[in-house]
Amino acid sequence: MFREGFVWGAGSSAYQIEGGAALDGRGPSIWDTLCRRPGAIHNSETGDVACDHYTRFRDDVDLMQRIGLGAYRFSVAWPRVLPLGIGRINEPGLDFYDQLVDSLLAANITPWVTLYHWDLPQGLFDRGGWLSPEIPAWFAEYTRVVVDRLSDRVTNWITINEPQIFVGLGYREGKHAPGLKLSMKEQLAAAHHVLLAHGRAVQVIRERARSTPSIGWAPVGRADYPAVETPENIEAARISSMSVHEPGFWNNTWFGDPVCLGHYPEDGVRLYGADMPRIERGDMETIFQKLDFYGVNIYSGVGVRRGADGATETVAWPAGVASTTMRWPVAPKSLYWGPRFLHERYQLPIVITENGMANPDWVAGDGRVHDPQRIDYTRAYLLELARAHADRVPVHGYFHWAALDNFEWAEGYKERFGLIHVDFATQKRTMKDSAYWYSEVIRSNGKHLSDASPFAQAAGPQVRRVAQETRQGVRGPVPVPGGRS
Ligand code: FCB
């Protein structure tokens, strides 16, 4: 169902799980600052403690091993490594990632390292942040420090997570750090610096990595798909997925084309006109670095069709459409058409670097966390990903978002995305039913997806069988808590 060697993983990011905000010399980031702004974050919550992963990482790796994860995607906190963003290196911060990598490897879990998942050092923001033309050089310096320390053991690198979101929500809409609402011209300048930073990071990794690297990035994918799969609608979806529709960053190509084709998309250049960023000689060459995979985060999508006048139309959601607690509609076809269109355009292997859903999970009276929605969602999406693979889209891996419940940015702790439940008052971890189910999916390399009744298996005899196997030494998930095994 999936290729041999398919990467089965789960993900996280530093600010969302680590906590330890004041420990061992970490500097402040723009998220620490935003979290202190009244009204910015749900319930005034912060990432100060989060999952306390900074001190509990060994236990967390243990849980991931028990799920059977083959890979774990985490991000390095720039301000933990370089408290001011440049200059002085904070050795204890680097030691943390050193130990995390060693624990993962000891657990047979391959580390995938994201260099930037939104926690810009406050010190660099004070010098202009993403608006400064110096930031590509700052990012290159930081990348060098991390690569020099980890690349003897880390081979999988992701430069930047979701530029669309941190520029769009951070510099355009003001909802994410640094909470600004700038002009289009300034937004585009920031975006251009992000692209240059990405390119410089790829160069540094290639130059300095001590083991042959595999490098990608993790943009968010806009997945418009044909509501009904006719040739006309497929073409309408392809065009719509690869267009710059309107000012802003909710598209694939504004960042994707420079990174993978070496130029900005023409429709966007026309749309932005005089707001276009200043492009210096050599910029596009810096941005256009060979990548080994196209990572993409896909959670939802929209169904489209070709309208009577030939233009693409969005098909309205039916009333009461299935949706997550983020109010993101459940749209499994996005995991077929998203990878397919992106591969067609950019000709790179695809890795799904994030996919998952927020659900109102809690620990039930029986001590377990029952999350059938997450199992159903993930199963439906993975079946579509398997269809993409069957249709010869080279899909190399899938990272469920997230390993643990965590700090969901402006939503605080109210949105739970994890396979593992976290009680934020006590830091107790509980494997959700979906973790047991996912562990079977991993073990069978996806064959388990075709089993008709995933919920019964997650909760019942299947888990008991696997638990028994575990006791007999076969690699499998942990026995069910509360003595049910
Ligand atoms: C993505 C982010 C990730 C998480 C998920 C739900 O936009 O990359 O950190 O917040 O959404």
Image (spheres, grey):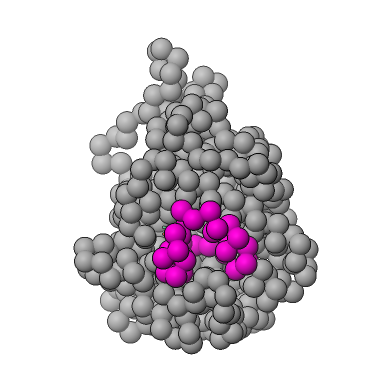
Magenta span includes 8: no
Q: Quadrant of residue 283?
A: top right
List x then y, in percent, for residue 85: 52, 70
Q: Going 71% across and 66% down the picture, which residue do you hit? A: 155
Q: Is residue 261 left or right of residue 303?
A: right
Q: Going 35% across and 47% down the picture, which residue do you hit? A: 182
Nearer to the camera, 51 or 87: 87
Magenta span includes 138: yes
Q: Is residue 424 placed above or below 411 in the rendered structure?
A: below
Q: Going 53% across and 40% down the picture, which residue do you hit? A: 278
Q: Is residue 398 left or right of residue 236?
A: right
Q: Is residue 115 placed above or below 329 in the rendered structure?
A: below
Nearer to the camera, 485 or 223: 223
Q: Ligand 1 lies in which image quarter?
A: bottom left
Q: Is residue 85 placed above or below 359 in the rendered structure?
A: below
The segment highlighted magenta reads: 114-143
What is the total number of numbered labels drawn onto the structure image? Answer: 0
Residue 412 in view of the camera: no
List x then y, in percent, for residue 293: 67, 50
List x then y, in percent, for residue 105: 67, 77
Nearer to the camera, 49 or 339: 49
Q: Is residue 418 left or right of residue 44?
A: right
Q: Quadrant of residue 441?
A: bottom right
Q: Is residue 298 left or right of residue 321?
A: right
Residue 124 in view of the camera: yes
Q: Going 36% across and 78% down the picture, which residue do you hit? A: 48
List x then y, in percent, for residue 163: 49, 51
